[in-house]
Amino acid sequence: MVLLVPFAALLALTWSSTRPGAPAAVPEAGLTPAEARTASQALLHQPPVQQRPALADGRVTDAEYRDAVERSMTCLEAALLDANPSLVPAEVRLGTPTRTVDGFTYTFHFSVHRPVGDPRPLDRRCQERFSSRVESLFHLQRRADPAFMAAAARSFHGCLDRAGLPATTATGPRARFLAVLADPSVDEREAVRARRCLGDHPSIGDLDL
């Protein structure tokens, strides 16, 4: 998401399951180990040199994932400064990567205190160089972990419950989310709360809503 405001551009860039290499569709219960192994093969084949150390053993730790995110953030900061020669480093404020509520991925924010061009192409290039395969393999590991997926589902249901959203006959988290949005008794403010819960739980799946 990119939000442009007068004299500043605030970027909220989210590492998510839609990055290159991630599965396009994930079952409600996650991935089986066999599915994760198949999906990981392409990620481990001739990765960019900057990502090879993290991928060398076929597994990605949380520390390796965070390091890849930070490297990509630093790359994007440098790319913005290079693409906008009138900017000075003090005008670019980099935030700290923050885990989502479900522990699936990271978000980060940084601000540029003057209008700049569209940063998304720069972001994509930095991801491809420093983080995309590391991130995708980390996500595959999470989605192939039944304990993680069960905990994420419980957390998501709890978020909806705390938001006062109705229980439904749907048992899966994505099915319940869609049922909540389809419920005529749910008003717009409640729908916003449901979408906020989904945003906090990207492991639930890719729902373009």
Image (cartoon, grey):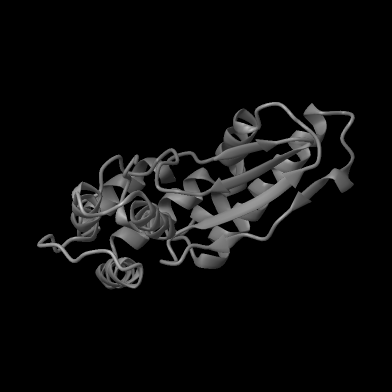
In which quadrant of the rendered image does the C terminus lie? top left
What x and y, as percent, mark residue 38?
A: 27, 47
Residue at horizontal 49 percent and vertical 65 percent from the top? 61
Residue at horizontal 34 percent and vertical 40 percent from the top? 208
Does 169 sit left or right of 156 as displayed? left
Residue 79 image-quadrant placement = top right
What x and y, as percent, mark residue 65?
A: 54, 59
In which quadrant of the rendered image does the N terminus lie? top right
Residue at horizontal 61 percent and vertical 36 percent from the top? 123
Q: Foreground residue, 145 or 167?
A: 167
Residue at horizontal 50 percent and vertical 51 percent from the top? 134
Q: How many marks?
A: 0
Does 186 sit left or right of 74 as displayed? left
Q: Foreground residue, 169 or 128?
A: 169
Residue 113 image-quadrant placement = top right
Is residue 208 shown to the viewer in this render? yes
Does 40 sit left or right of 62 as displayed? left
154 to 40, vertically: above or below: below
What x and y, as percent, mark residue 175?
A: 18, 54
158 to 90, vertically: above or below: below
Is residue 74 shown to the viewer in this render? no
Does 128 sit left or right of 181 as displayed? right
What x and y, as percent, mark residue 159?
A: 35, 68
